[in-house]
């Protein structure tokens, strides 16, 4: 069912794409019609412009003649001005060369002055260094004079000491003459030693005095010499300063003169460059005017030759255009025949689509009616199932209440047997109701299968019809493509015709210009009749020929216009046919859209039926599960619902009836024997009342697949024995026992409902839990 749905989706997408393409084509046709109208208006405007250009050409011829005469006069005047400007330029060049020579001389003088200034600055620096040396010498002389003064002071002090010693000696000699005379004998040796010491002291003093006098004399001589040198240095420094001031004054005067000369030279250069640029611009303008005039003369000659060649090319193109128009007419006739055939085929396809849509509507109505019937049956079944489930719930609650009441009051065997019989009767009634519900579900399933089969058949038919419609749409698309190709060819032919008309208009304009130029040439030749009589006659002949060619070309232009009008009318008719085809395509698209909507509605109904079937199956499953729960609860009540369930089993109703018909001896024998169980069809379908397996794992042992099962009465403590017995039974090594035990414990812990049935691989279990 997925593939046909995808195909239907693809068909719907293709239909949408074709609809969009048809819309675009209709828009393109409208745009082409607008462009054709614009081209017509452009042609009319060009005709008006051609007429106005012809009128302007006749007026511009006279202006050109007057401009030619004025240009010749201007050329003569400009030639004279050019000669004068050349002379002025030569004079300016001579003046410029003189100015450059003067500038070079001034630059040499300035360089000489700069060198002199540098020499003076060097001499000033040497004088400054000498003055510094002289100052150092003066400082040294001052130090020497200070030393001389200190020596003189020392000498004066020594003289004063000597006088004081002499005086003290004379006074002591006088005061002690008597004493000395008295002690002359004792002190002769002392006086002699004192005199010797005094003599030595005097000798030393005299030597020191002589040395000091020599040093003073040398110091005074050096001081006088240094004073003379300092005076000379001062005079030389003063002379250097005066010379430096004079040199600076002369340098400033030279700088002022140099600046004035530079200013004059700069102004002269500016004036000369201005004059030279002015003269150069005038010369350039004169040369450009002369070149322009020469180019105009050469262009006129070349254009005359080119116009003659253009006339020949236009005649050749006109003949080729006539042949192409004939071929275009033949192609248009063939395309008209193809277009009519396509229109007939399109009408047939539209009729087939109408028939398919009517059939589809009938089938959709039939399917909707059957779907409503199946829905009603499903609703009744669902209501019945809900009623049965609610009734059984209420009965179960009543039974639980009765059991509780019976347990509270008494636990007699007769009451237990009555409860057992009543439960058995209710069980039989429930089983019968469940069988009826199952038969109803089977009938509903059969009805659903039949309805689904019919819906599939009808959907297959609808898909086949949709495929036919898609084929028809594809054929229509091909026809529209052919129609577009025809329209494109017509547009190209129309554009070529318009281009040819434009070229002819341009050629006519060129011819008019040629005529105007020839007329100007003829007038010029008339001014020079004495020199160009033969040229004038030939020009008149050419003018007559061009006039005749113009008349012929105008006639051909009228014919082309008539052909263009016919082509435009035919294009309008084709556009009208295309518009009608677009309208038909739009109607067909609308019908296809309605068919798509109906198909989608059928698909939705089919999905609703499938969902209803799934819900019915779910309810059936829930009912079966609920019945299984009730059967389990009944079995548990039978087994463990009495207080004396530990003292023996309560016989069923069938067993009690059998026992009533037998003798007492037979009862004893029957009590020792177990009656064979009769299989219930409900038990066969639903299974046992209590499941015999709690956990069942289908293990892939590598060489075979075995089932590891755990019974409901077995607990986690029994997992080791269960696994060991399983491994021994299938001859598997005991190394896997721990992993299998852990796996069973994990399954039991993670299980939400029992029984649990799983599939596993022994290697994977060992890798995870080993």
Image (spheres, rainbow, N blue to C red):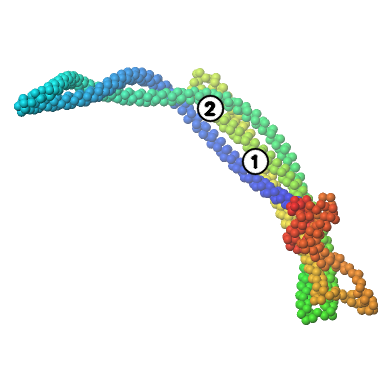
In this rendering, the answer to whether 48 lies above or below 436 is: above
Q: Are marks 2 and 1 in contact (CB under 8 Å)?
A: no
**What residue lies at 62% left-to-right and 43% top-to-bottom?**
35
Residue indicated by mark 2: 517
Q: How many marks?
A: 2
Q: Quadrant of the N terminus?
A: bottom right
Q: Which label belongs to residue 565?
A: 1
- Front residue of 353/467: it is 467
Indicate left or right for 652 with 306 as reference. Answer: right
**What residue lies at 79% left-to-right and 68% top-to-bottom?**
629
Quarter-wise, where is residue 256 in the image? top left
Quarter-wise, where is residue 663 in the image? bottom right
Residue 219 in the image, given as x and y percentages of width and height: 18, 21
Residue 294 appears in the rendering: yes
Quarter-wise, where is residue 740 in the image? bottom right
In this rendering, the answer to whether 663 lies above or below 169 is: below
Judge the density around disc 1: few (<14), some (14-19), many (≥20) Cα neighbours within 10 Å.
few
């Amino acid at each position: 069912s997925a593939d046909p749905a995808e195909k239907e989706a693809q068909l719907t997408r293709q239909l949408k794409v074709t609809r969009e393409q048809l819309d675009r084509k209709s828009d393109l046709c409208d745009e082409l019609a607008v462009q054709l109208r614009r081209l017509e208006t452009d042609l009319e405007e060009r005709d008006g412009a051609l007429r106005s250009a012809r009128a302007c050409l006749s007026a511009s011829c006279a202006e050109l003649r007057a401009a030619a005469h004025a240009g010749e006069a201007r050329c003569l005047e400009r030639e004279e001005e050019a000669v004068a400007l050349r002379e002025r330029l030569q004079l300016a060049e001579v003046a410029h060369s003189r100015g450059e020579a003067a500038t070079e001389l001034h630059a040499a003088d300035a360089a000489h002055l700069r060198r002199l200034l540098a020499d003076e600055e060097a001499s000033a620096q040497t004088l400054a260094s000498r003055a510094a040396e002289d100052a150092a010498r003066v400082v040294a002389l001052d130090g020497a004079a200070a030393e001389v003064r200190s020596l003189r002071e020392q000498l004066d002090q020594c003289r004063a000491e000597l006088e004081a010693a002499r005086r003290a000696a004379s006074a002591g000699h006088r005061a002690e003459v008597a004493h000395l005379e008295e002690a002359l004998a004792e002190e002769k040796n002392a006086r002699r030693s004192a005199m010797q010491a005094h003599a030595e002291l005097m000798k030393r003093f005299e030597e020191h005095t002589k040395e000091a006098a020599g040093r003073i004399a040398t110091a005074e001589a050096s001081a006088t010499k240094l004073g003379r040198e300092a005076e000379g240095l001062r005079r030389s420094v003063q002379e250097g300063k005066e010379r430096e001031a004079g040199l600076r004054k002369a340098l400033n005067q030279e700088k002022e003169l140099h600046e004035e000369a530079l200013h004059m030279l700069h102004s002269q250069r500016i004036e000369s460059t201005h004059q030279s640029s002015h003269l150069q611009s005038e010369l350039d303008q004169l040369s450009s005017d002369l070149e322009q005039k020469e180019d105009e003369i050469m262009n006129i000659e070349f254009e005359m030759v080119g116009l003659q060649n253009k006339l020949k090319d236009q005649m050749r193109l006109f003949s080729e255009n006539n042949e192409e128009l004939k071929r275009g007419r033949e192609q248009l006739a063939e395309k008209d025949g193809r277009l009519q055939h396509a229109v007939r085929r399109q009408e047939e396809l539209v009729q087939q689509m109408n028939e398919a849509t009517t059939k589809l509507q009938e089938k959709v109505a039939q399917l909707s009616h059957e779907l409503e019937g199946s829905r009603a049956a499903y609703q009744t079944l669902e209501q019945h199932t809900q009623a049965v489930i609610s009734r059984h719930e209420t009965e179960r609650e009543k039974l639980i209440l009765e059991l509780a009441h019976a347990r509270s009051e008494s636990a007699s065997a007769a009451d237990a047997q009555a409860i057992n019989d009543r439960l058995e009767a209710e069980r039989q009634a429930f089983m019968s109701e469940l069988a009826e519900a199952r038969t109803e579900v089977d009938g509903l399933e059969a009805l659903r299968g039949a309805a689904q089969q019919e819906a599939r058949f009808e959907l297959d038919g609808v898909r086949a019809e949709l495929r036919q419609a898609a084929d028809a749409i594809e054929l229509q698309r091909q026809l529209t493509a052919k129609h577009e190709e025809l329209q494109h060819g017509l547009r190209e032919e129309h554009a070529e015709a318009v281009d040819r008309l434009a070229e002819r208009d341009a050629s006519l304009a060129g011819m008019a210009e040629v005529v105007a130029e020839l007329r100007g040439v003829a007038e010029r030749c008339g001014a020079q009749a004495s020199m160009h009589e033969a040229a004038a006659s030939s020009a008149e002949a050419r003018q007559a020929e061009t006039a005749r060619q113009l008349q012929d070309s105008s006639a051909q232009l009228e014919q082309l216009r008539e052909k263009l009008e016919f082509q435009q009318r035919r294009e309008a008719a084709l556009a009208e046919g295309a518009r009608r085809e677009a309208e038909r395509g739009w109607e067909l698209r609308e019908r296809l859209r309605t068919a798509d909507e109906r198909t989608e509605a059928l698909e939705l109904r089919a999905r609703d039926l499938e969902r209803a079937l799934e819900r019915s199956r779910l309810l059936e499953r829930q009912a079966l599960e609920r019945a299984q729960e009730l059967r389990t609860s009944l079995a548990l009540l039978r087994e463990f619902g009495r207080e004396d369930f530990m003292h023996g089993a309560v016989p069923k109703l069938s067993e009690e009836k059998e026992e009533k018909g037998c003798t007492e001896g037979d009862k004893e024998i029957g009590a020792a024997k177990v009656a064979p169980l009769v299989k219930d069809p409900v038990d066969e379908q639903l299974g046992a009342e209590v499941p015999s397996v709690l956990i069942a794992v289908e293990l892939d042992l590598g060489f075979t697949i075995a089932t590891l099962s755990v019974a409901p009465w077995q607990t986690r403590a029994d997992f080791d024995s269960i696994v060991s017995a399983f491994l021994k039974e299938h001859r598997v090594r005991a190394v896997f026992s721990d992993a299998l035990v852990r796996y069973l414990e994990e399954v039991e812990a993670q299980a939400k409902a029992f029984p649990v049935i799983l599939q596993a691989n022994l290697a994977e279990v060992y890798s995870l839990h080993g």
